[in-house]
Image (cartoon, grey):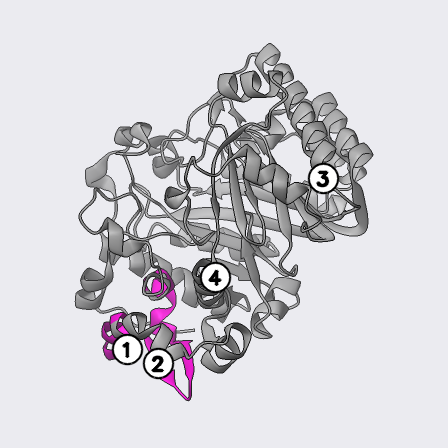
């Protein structure tokens, strides 16, 4: 797949914008929505019969300078044990409100570093989850792994417990890049773990990379691509580095002058796309790739892809119940985010209250716009007639302002609107966030505020 890059177009469209793992994006959540609304939803029989569970394990042994996640740097086992105790308490409290039976079709452990837990802690938490929820025999059970703390014994335990998908956080194999972001992991270590996981027979192995880090160039990034083609992981994710030091203070440790320019950055991504697609991978959504036989590729080609806070998924829309600090629950018309700090998380649970920090309750307009935006982010395509039939609106009238905002993208050959359909063209693929932004009703109110999002390129 070929993508043309024009410097003037890159400069023109390189603006701050959300990544749209949700709509509305998280900065629009409000403390006006909290425990009361969450309990009402859990108790209302509205929770979908099929559910997804997310468990946030925030602990890391050291800080990666690029990190945008909520992490706790510690090696104190007492802190970790106490957190796991409260995590279980949160599960029991949620279940005390949850009405009727639900079957888990997706279970994901994220972080932080979930495999920072000991073998006993991993097994104990998993068995606790299995004891308290009904897990479908064919459920997607996945975990994020940091190669620096992954042991072969962990991989064996995860396979024995029932984890069938694993994701290695590689980011970059270049030594200079690794030193600059404080994440040193020899390529030999990654390779050994990858082949060990292959031998154990996991259904799917994903690798995460980041582009836009210090010292990365189109030429230097070739080393990542050479190894990828040698390893042949089932899935790949290439995340654009979000430099937001006004939000994540530790990112000031990154040498700003060594970051690639927006043009160099998009040239790196262009090379990623062209190299992987020429070698058989399917380019999915914003930044994911998968082998043609992978169910993610099949869903994308059939325009049946979905997206939640865990990324792209083939599973139908279903409620996500999330546990742990900063974890975000995602429901049909409600978002709920947990407390941010360990102490406030524990204190709230000590009062037998759900540890909610904030949330958002959706109205008709939110749900409609979410549907349009997710179709853009997942399937690169919106059928106006389908939206009109589902929501009983006239698309061009309802989204008149949005269509006007899309005109520069049409003129630059990034998208087309014809036959009552919006389609993302190949050159527009790296800029689908910009397309989605045209339908975001919340951006209008933030024009004069300090940027809260990363650049789209």
Q: CA distance from mark 3 to mark 1?
A: 47 Å
Residue depicted at 44% across the width and 31% down the height? 184
Residue depicted at x 62% and y 41%: 40
Q: Earlier in the sequence, mark 1 or mark 4?
A: 4
Q: Residue at x 33, y 43 (%)?
A: 213
Q: Quadrant of residue 256?
A: top left
Q: Residues within 10 Å of mark 4 (few under 14, many from 20)?
A: few
Q: Which is closer to the viewer, label 2 or label 3?
A: 3
**Mark 4 in CB contact with mark 3 (< 8 angstroms):** no
Tag 4's secondary structure? helix
In this rendering, the label closer to the viewer, 4 or 2: 4
Q: Residues within 10 Å of mark 2 (few under 14, many from 20)?
A: some
Q: Residues within 10 Å of mark 1 (few under 14, many from 20)?
A: some
The answer to the question of whether label 2 and label 1 lie on touching residues, with beta carbons closer than 8 A, is yes
**Location of mark 2 (residue):** 416
Residue denoted by label 4: 364
Spatial CA distance of label 1 from label 4 is 28 Å
State the SS at label 2.
strand
On-image quarter of the N terminus: bottom left
Residue picked out by circle 1 = 410
Residue 230 drawn at (x, y percent): 56, 55
Q: Which residues are magenta?
A: 405-434
Counting residues from the start of the chain, the first of labels 2 and 1 encountered is 1
User: Circle 1 — which element?
Assistant: helix
| Rendered image: mark on residue 388 | none
Instruction: Please check the rendered image and state whether residue 406 is part of the magenta-colored stretch, yes or no.
Output: yes
Corner quadrant of residue 306: bottom right
Return the residue at label 3.
98
Q: CA distance from mark 2 to mark 1?
A: 6 Å
Q: Residue at x 47, y 52 (%)?
A: 22
Q: Quick check: marks 4 and 2 in contact, CB under 8 Å?
A: no
- Image coordinates of residue 49 in percent, x first then y, are 74, 53
């Amino acid at each position: 797949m070929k993508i043309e890059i024009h410097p003037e177009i890159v400069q023109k469209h390189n603006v701050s914008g959300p990544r749209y793992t949700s709509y509305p994006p998280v900065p629009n959540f409000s403390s006006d929505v909290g425990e009361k609304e969450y309990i009402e939803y859990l108790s209302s029989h509205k929770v979908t019969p099929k559910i997804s569970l997310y468990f946030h394990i925030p602990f890391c042994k050291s800080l990666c300078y690029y990190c945008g996640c909520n992490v706790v740097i510690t090696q104190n086992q007492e802190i970790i044990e106490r957190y796991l105790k409260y995590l279980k308490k949160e599960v029991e409290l949620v279940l005390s409100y949850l009405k009727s039976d639900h079957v888990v079709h997706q279970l994901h452990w994220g972080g932080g570093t979930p495999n920072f837990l000991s073998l006993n802690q991993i097994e104990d938490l998993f068995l606790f989850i299995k004891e308290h929820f009904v897990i479908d025999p064919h459920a997607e059970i996945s975990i994020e792994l940091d190669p620096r703390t992954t042991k072969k014994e962990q991989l064996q335990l995860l396979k024995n417990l029932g984890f069938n998908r694993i994701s290695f956080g590689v980011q970059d194999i270049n030594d200079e890049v690794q030193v600059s972001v404080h994440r040193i992991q020899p390529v030999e270590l990654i390779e050994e773990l990858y082949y060990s996981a292959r031998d154990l027979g996991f259904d799917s192995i994903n690798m995460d990379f980041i582009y836009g880090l210090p010292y990365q160039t189109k030429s230097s990034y070739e080393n990542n691509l050479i190894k990828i083609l040698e390893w042949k992981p089932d899935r790949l994710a290439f995340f654009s580095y979000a430099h937001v030091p006004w939000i994540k203070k530790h990112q000031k440790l990154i040498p700003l002058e060594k970051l690639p320019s927006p043009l160099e950055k998009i040239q790196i991504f262009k090379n990623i796309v062209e190299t992987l697609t020429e070698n058989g991978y399917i380019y999915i959504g914003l930044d994911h790739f998968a082998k043609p036989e992978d169910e993610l590729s099949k869903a994308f080609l059939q325009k049946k892809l979905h997206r939640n806070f865990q990324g792209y998924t083939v599973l139908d829309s279903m409620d996500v119940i999330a546990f742990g600090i900063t974890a975000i629950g995602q429901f049909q018309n409600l978002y709920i985010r947990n407390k941010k700090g360990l102490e406030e998380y524990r204190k709230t649970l000590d009062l037998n209250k759900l540890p909610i920090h904030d949330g958002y309750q959706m109205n008709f307009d939110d749900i409609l716009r979410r549907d349009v935006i997710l179709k853009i982010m997942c399937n690169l395509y919106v059928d106006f007639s389908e939206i009109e039939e589902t929501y009983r609106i006239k698309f061009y009238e309802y989204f008149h302002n949005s269509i006007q905002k899309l005109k520069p993208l049409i003129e630059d050959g990034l998208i087309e609107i014809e036959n009552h359909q919006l389609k993302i063209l190949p050159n527009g693929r790296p800029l689908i966030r910009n397309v989605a932004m045209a339908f975001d009703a919340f951006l209008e109110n933030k024009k004069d505020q300090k940027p809260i999002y990363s650049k789209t390129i």
